[in-house]
Image: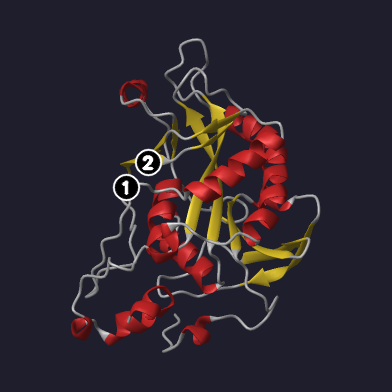
Amino acid sequence: MISGETVAEWRLMSGPKEQIRVGVIGGSGLYEIEGLTIVGERFVETPFGDPSDAFVIGRIGDDSVAFLSRHGRGHLRSPSEINFRANIFGMKLLGVEMILSASAVGSMKEEYHPTDIAFPDQFIDRTRHRPDTFFGRGLVAHVSFADPICKEVSSLAADASESAGARTHRGGTYLCMEGPQFSTRAESNLYRSWGVDVIGMTNLQEAKLAREAEICYATMALITDYDCWHQSEEAVSVDQVIGYLKRNAETACRIIGDVVPTLAQRERSCECASALKYALITDRSKIPSQVRDELAPIVGKYL
């Protein structure tokens, strides 16, 4: 486990020397992007353990991008087993400032069809077993999370989605459930009564941790099914989800290939970059030195 005194001790010395400003979290199928050159892999250790996999570093034109397979290549980890803290902390160590997260979701509304792509801007938390903060252990922080998605990154990604020909939905609410089981019919109908738009198992913790790490974050929700509320459709099955997800993968790759260069050249004018400015509550003299050192990549500029 890394426990050095400076950010530089956490930086990896191999691979591209320029900053990797854009990160993509999703499945390994997202590496199949036209014009993407794979530079190599970078293994990152964090104070929170190992990320899901090595980060795959690539280039699209002149711009670098870091890919991470959320469940590990080969899909080794269930949603509740993902080390979300290590994944986002690893992105921070690489210098990533913006994350586009791609994930399969179920539709909770008739007008959100399988193979559509949604860019939700709100979350509801129905998880139970997941660490979702870097803080504690003697350092308390309370970040603003009223608007959990970076509007600028989400809007640029939605523009790319429309340009790729996908039926695109801007905004809406993503309900994050624990899983790994899908919903019961009673749960599905309850969530629909709340007015949610899509349901998934992974993105909320990523969004919370990205905000604490002052990384812009947006969700690209790839709709694969109608959950189990839809009476004219069969209850969701793994085969069905995988089939629609494969159809979405090609479109998702086009979107990523289009938007990464735009994001890489973007000047951040949003509040994501200063989310911790007023969030650190603990008396600076009381912060344990080990916690201060371990969280230096996130809090160092304020301490």
> Which residue is disc 1 drawn over?
146
Q: Is residue 237 left or right of residue 17?
A: left
- Residue shown at the point (74%, 63%) measured from the top left: 59
Q: Can residue 295 be seen?
A: no
Which sits in the foreground, 190 or 35? 35
What residue appears at the point 44 percent right and 21 percent down from the top-left corner? Answer: 228
Q: Position of residue 276 (x, y in %)?
A: 34, 67
In the rendering, at what x and y percent does residue 73 appear? 62, 55
Residue 57 to residue 207: above or below: below
Q: Which residue is mark 2?
A: 123
Residue 234 higher or lower than 248, as above or below: above
**Residue type pointed to by label 2:** Phe
Please, is residue 228 above or below residue 97 in the view?
Answer: above
Q: Quadrant of residue 135?
A: bottom left
Q: Is residue 189 positioned above or below 129 on the image?
A: above
Q: Secondary structure at mark 1?
A: loop
Disc with the residue nearer the chain's start (1 vs 2): 2
Quadrant, the N terminus: bottom left
